[in-house]
Image: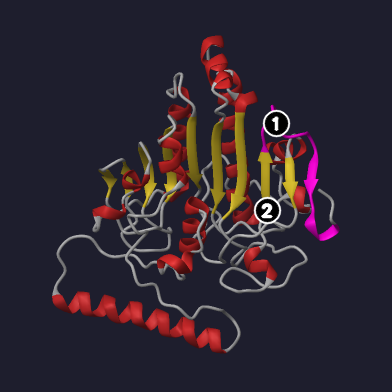
Amino acid sequence: MSDKKQSTSKRNNQPNIIIINCDDLGYGDLPPYDNTVMNTPHINQLAQGGVKFTSFYACNSLCTPSRFGLLTGRYPERAGLGWVLGAKRAGHRPPVVSRLEDFWGRFRWEVAKFLTRLGLMDYNNEPKPRGIPEKEVTIAKALKNVGYKTCMIGKWHLGEFPIYSEYHPLRFGFDHFFGVPHSNDMKDFALYRDNECLSPDFTEMEKLTGLYTREAIEFIEQAEDKPFFLYFAHTYPHQPLHASENFRGKSKGGLYGDTIEEIDWSLGELVKTLKANGQWENTLVIFTSDNGAWYNGSAGKFRGRKGQSYEGGYRIPMIAHWPEEIPHGTVCDFSRHEH
């Protein structure tokens, strides 16, 4: 990045903003939060050079409502998005298939209500809309209005845009999109670039983190003289777990650890690009998760997991780094009133 570009960004007081949102990463999954198994040097450096929040909570312990809250700043219940949106098959389907899919969706919801009565989950409001309402103002919309270039990479899960185009990320303030409609355990796992379907049934899931990262680097490098906003929503460590050949079998944390260490590598590649382009000093990087750990992850010392209202379902890691503004090595711990 030229000195002219950097001075323009500073003069307008508009930092670049990157939000890295992992899927099902637990509070106790990272070394800055006392994990002794994972090897995450880039995440560690991000925490050491910025602020680590030890009392940070998602607005929900499931992905759809949590992502809605993150992008809009509003309670998901106000938009009817208190539960996970299911996947819908694209294309023509025989009536019997449609009925079976409707039955399956109803069955999943009845199971959720039953588990709620047992105290294993805490969800009572079935989602009504098919996705995020058009009237909602996302971070991307707000930033685009003040001159930012915007990009979303990774998992959307706020509406099945292959079927209902009104829920496409490009309709909610993003100039560019590269990613998937929903979680990788759902049917019709399609990979998109903007409105183009690159693969209607993407199966090479071990390549996802690398593909996401290369797309993010390309966006950063093409930002030119405008400030940019990048929402980078990783697919992992959501089940089923996959890691590329360079990371599979390398972590002490098993395949779960492999996916986290590849996410750490991805962060390192972004940092390297920002530094090479002269953008690092004026970029706010936020690293977090959509909710607590699911099967393999750790909630640390807290009770509960994803889908529950216990601490472990909502309390998540959150690190913010901005060299020009955030003092190095800061810890924000509301439980001990240390700010």
Q: Quadrant of residue 305?
A: bottom right
Q: Dot 2: few (<14), some (14–19), or many (≥20) neighbours within 10 Å?
A: many
Q: Which residue type carries mark 2? A: Pro
Q: Which residue sits at x=23%, y=58%?
A: 163
Quarter of the rendering containing residue 107: bottom left
Q: CA distance from mark 1 to mark 2?
A: 20 Å
Image position of 269 with respect to 295: above or below:
above
SS for dot 2: loop
Q: Residues within 10 Å of mark 1 (few under 14, many from 20)?
A: few
Query: Of circles 1 and 2, which is in front?
Result: 1
Q: Residue at x 79, y 56 (%)?
A: 334
Residue 282: x, y in percent?
A: 61, 26
289 or 337, nearer to the observer: 337
Please tell me which residue is depicted at 14% across the width and 64% down the height of the picture.
92
Above or below for 113 versus 328: below
Residue type beneath disc 1 = Glu
Mark positioned earlier in the residue sequence (1 or 2): 2
The question of residue 29 being in magenta is answered with: no
- Give the residue pinned by disc 1: 325
> Which residue is drawn at the image coordinates 78% and 66% (left, top)?
301
**Image position, residue 42 (x, y; %):** 68, 36
Horizontal side, residue 245 vs residue 323: left or right: left
Q: Which mark is residue 317?
A: 2
Magenta region, residue range? 321-336
Q: Is residue 31 visible?
A: no
Q: How is the image coloured?
A: secondary structure
- What SS does tag 1 mark? loop
Q: Position of residue 287 (x, y in %)?
A: 62, 45
